[in-house]
Image (spheres, grey):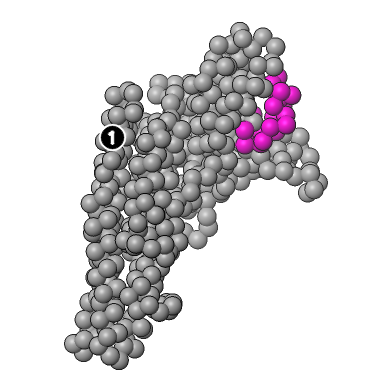
């Protein structure tokens, strides 16, 4: 599965509560599963009606309910030279506010969340806080910059005859809603698939181009909040397209017990990425990265922070970071050595000075986590909240950061256990053996 944004859908409000027509329609496409509302914080998900096994078909969405960037509709000519990832934005606005025909497809669009919490709703101060706390060297990349794309959309939309009769069509909030809907819900979709499903024709390879597609219902599956059992799952989750009848098919990527929520994987996403793009975080995120800093008065590392004078490093809770080890070791010894196996290096020590060097490396490693990461997380965030106008926004980000900081600190403590294990199994055993 390839998704055009950093993620697939919004977890916090994954559907507009109360749209029974859309829910009934989506349930008719669901195989041994049902759309379930899990509360205000989480929104909608999909629950198993029976035990689900890996590879089982979960959802079949007929082509007529798919919205692709290759479709022709009354506004097509006004946006035909636009980027494929952008084209779904005006299409959503047209279907929701202009198309006079009420259809099942329109009810599915109305089922989309009314608002999105994430990157484009954050103030600059909020973003500065997130980047400084959870990693200055983490780059946010998006196929659509909603703030830039808004001006482009208005320029094009104003050329549409009688567009002024649709007040929503030139509304900033409406555009941001549509843009974030596409960013968080759209899949990549190639023209060759469109030709097969819509026209029942083959497209020459040289004419194939990537586009985008919205798959209502399939985008209700939430991202898994726990590590996949790699022994039980050997095939990655993917969307398949069948020609007879034309439809998109979603299959299970794991076993699920009756009554549990069915999850799919969006691919590797850290809690930082999930927070700024989607506004949610996971309690058991196996892909999570934390950032710590090692203080330094000189620029002797990648991504050096000259103002606060430190070197940032990414850590995972159960994996030793050799970049930190090598940085500290070379700083202490003034050597240019690359250590790849710390246990082997410790085992080969034959003098006190080398033993002491490694002791200093791990003392520095441990102290950097404690002094920088664990006690830094909420610094400056309350100041940034002053720029959030609504109390609802303040409460939302306060809650998000509290949980993100808590999980971040928890993972840092777990990483400390890995560091201490090296000291116990390596240095101490070497000294007293």
Query: What residue lies at 64% left-to-right and 12% top-to-bottom?
Result: 163
Quarter-wise, where is residue 367 in the image?
A: bottom left
Q: Is 347 included in the stretch rendered in magenta?
A: no
Secondary structure at badge 1 equals: helix
Q: Residue at x 30, y 84 (%)?
A: 354
**Nearest the eye: 14 or 58:** 14
Horizontal and vertical percent for residue 255?
42, 52
Residue 290 shows in the view = no
All told, the count of numbered labels is: 1
Determine crowd level at label 1: few under 14, some 14-19, many 20+ residues with C-alpha closer than 10 A.
Answer: few
Q: Is residue 119 above or below residue 336?
A: above
Q: In which quadrant is the C terminus drawn?
A: bottom left
Q: Image quadrant of residue 170?
A: top right
369 on left or right of 2: left
Res. 127 image quadrant: top left
Q: Is residue 36 above or below residue 8?
A: above
Q: Is residue 125 left or right of residue 246?
A: left
Question: Is residue 352 visible to us here?
Answer: yes
Q: Which is nearer the eye, 418 or 224?
A: 418
Q: Residue furthest left?
A: 432
> Residue 120: percent from the left, percent from the top?
46, 33
Q: Is residue 72 magenta?
A: yes
Does residue 244 appear to the left or right of 375 in the view shown? right
Span of residues in magenta: 62-86
Q: Residue at x 34, y 28 (%)?
A: 388
Residue assigned mark 1? 383
> Which residue lies at the image location 31% right of the left edge and 88% below the top edge?
349
Can you give x and y, in whole percent of width and height, for residue 282 in the image? 35, 46
* Residue 125 percent location from the top left of the image: 37, 36
Of the pair 319 and 286, the residue shown nearer to us:
319
């Amino acid at each position: 599965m390839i998704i055009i944004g950093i993620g697939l859908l919004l977890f916090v409000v994954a559907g507009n509560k109360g749209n029974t027509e859309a829910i009934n329609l989506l349930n008719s496409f669901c195989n041994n599963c049902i759309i379930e509302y899990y509360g205000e914080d989480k929104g909608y998900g999909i629950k198993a009606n029976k035990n689900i096994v890996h590879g089982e078909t979960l959802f079949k969405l007929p082509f007529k309910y798919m919205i692709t960037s290759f479709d022709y509709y009354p506004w097509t000519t006004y946006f035909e030279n636009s980027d494929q990832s952008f084209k779904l934005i005006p299409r959503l606005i047209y279907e929701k506010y202009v198309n006079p025909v009420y259809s099942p497809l329109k009810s599915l669009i109305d089922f989309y969340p009314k608002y999105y919490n994430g990157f484009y709703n954050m103030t600059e101060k909020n973003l500065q806080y997130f980047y400084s706390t959870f990693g200055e060297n983490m780059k946010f990349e998006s196929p659509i910059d909603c703030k830039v794309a808004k001006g482009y959309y208005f320029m094009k939309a104003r050329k549409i005859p009688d567009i002024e009769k649709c007040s929503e069509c030139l509304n900033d909030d409406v555009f941001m809603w549509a843009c974030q809907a596409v960013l968080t819900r759209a899949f990549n979709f190639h023209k060759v698939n469109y030709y097969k499903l819509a026209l029942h024709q083959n497209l020459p390879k040289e004419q194939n181009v990537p586009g985008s597609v919205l798959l209502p219902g399939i985008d209700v599956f939430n991202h898994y909040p726990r590590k996949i059992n790699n022994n039980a799952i050997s095939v990655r989750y993917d969307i398949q397209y069948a020609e007879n009848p034309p439809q998109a098919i979603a299959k299970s990527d794991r076993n699920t017990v009756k009554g549990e929520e069915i999850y799919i994987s969006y691919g590797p996403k850290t809690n930082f990425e999930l927070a700024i793009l989607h506004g949610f975080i996971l309690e058991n995120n196996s892909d999570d990265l934390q950032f710590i800093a090692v203080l330094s008065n000189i620029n002797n590392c990648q991504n050096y922070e000259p103002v606060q004078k430190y070197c940032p490093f990414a850590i995972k809770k159960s994996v030793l970071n050799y970049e930190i080890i090598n940085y500290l070791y070379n700083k202490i010894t003034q050597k240019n050595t690359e250590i790849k196996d710390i246990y082997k290096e410790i085992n080969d020590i034959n003098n006190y000075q080398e033993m002491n060097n490694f002791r200093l490396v791990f003392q520095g490693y441990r102290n950097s986590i404690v002094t920088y990461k664990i006690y830094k997380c909420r610094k400056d965030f309350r100041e940034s909240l002053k720029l959030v106008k609504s109390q609802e926004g303040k409460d939302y980000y306060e809650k998000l950061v509290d949980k993100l900081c808590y999980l971040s600190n928890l993972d840092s403590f777990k990483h400390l256990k890995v560091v201490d294990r090296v000291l116990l199994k390596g240095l101490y055993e070497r000294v007293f053996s």
